[in-house]
Image (cartoon, rainbow, N blue to C red):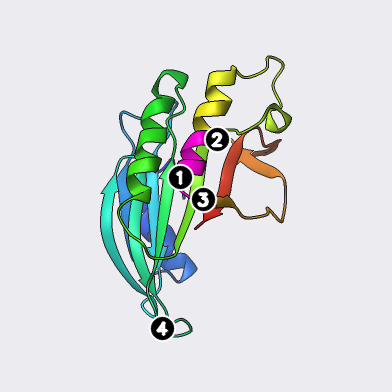
Amino acid sequence: MEMKILGNRCEAIGDQLGFHICLAIDGQGLGGGGGGLCLMWRESISVEIIGSAANYIDCLVQTDEVESKWRSTGFYGYPDRTRRRESWALLRHLSLLSDKPWLLMGDFNDIVSDSEWRGRIPQPPWLLRGFREAIQHSGLQNVTFQGYQLTWEQGRAIQHSGLQNVTFER
């Protein structure tokens, strides 16, 4: 999950929620006021971190319910338009690192069609095309969203604009 708090605070929140293992990644340098990423899990789940940086945490997961390992990646796309190509290149790169089933989730700060955009000015075609091509190249499919179409900003609910907290799987 994207966080706007320091790592030690993330760990304290994880403990309160029953997630006693935590990896917090500082998000400095991403732009847009993002505060980094945090992955929390319980002792009953086996998590092997295979890579991380300011905008992703990549791991292999194994549970008692599923014998084989699968891959999970938390992702935060660059909010600055001028850096979106870097996000897309990272998606493509991550897609090549493993052939295990892959769950990719996070805030991509991107959309694949204008129908997802809630702003007044339509998104440039190169933005839509670039993200769509990165998804296709990576062999990802959108998992149908269920739940509230809202996210939280400074204590109030706002409507989504773009792919936020969206999950893709392969």
Who comes first in sequence, dot 1 or dot 3? 1
> Which residue position holds label 4?
67
Q: Is residue 8 visible?
A: no
Viewer-side residue, 25 vs 85:
85
Please state the horizontal and vertical placement of residue 34, each as a whole percent of the image. Answer: 43, 34
Q: Quadrant of residue 48?
A: bottom left
**Residue under the point 40% across and 38% down:** 35
Amino acid type of the residue that numbered disc 3 sits on in the rendered structure: Leu
> Which residue position holds label 1?
2
Who comes first in sequence, dot 1 or dot 2? 1
- Neighbor class of circle 2 (other Cα within 10 Å; few <14, some 14-19, many 20+) is some
User: Do the numbered discs 3 and 4 sit on residues whose CB atoms are within 8 Å?
Assistant: no
Q: Which mark's residue is nearer the viewer, 3 or 4?
A: 3
116 to 69, vertically: above or below: above
Is 55 magenta? The answer is: no
**Residue under the point 32% across and 43% down:** 93
- Neighbor class of circle 4 (other Cα within 10 Å; few <14, some 14-19, many 20+) is few
Amino acid type of the residue that numbered disc 1 sits on in the rendered structure: Glu
Please state the horizontal and vertical placement of residue 71, each as a whole percent of the image. Answer: 39, 63
Who comes first in sequence, dot 3 or dot 4? 4
User: Do the numbered discs 1 and 4 sit on residues whose CB atoms are within 8 Å?
Assistant: no
How far apart, in angstroms, are the residues tagged by discs 1 and 2? Answer: 22 Å
Q: Secondary structure at mark 1?
A: loop
Amino acid type of the residue that numbered disc 2 sits on in the rendered structure: Arg
**Residue 132 numbered mark, or none:** 2
> Magenta: predominant secondary structure element?
helix
Q: Secondary structure at mark 4?
A: loop
Amino acid type of the residue that numbered disc 4 sits on in the rendered structure: Glu
Q: Secondary structure at mark 3?
A: loop
Q: Which mark's residue is nearer the viewer, 1 or 4?
A: 4
Q: Magenta stretch: give its range.
A: 133-140
Who comes first in sequence, dot 2 or dot 4? 4
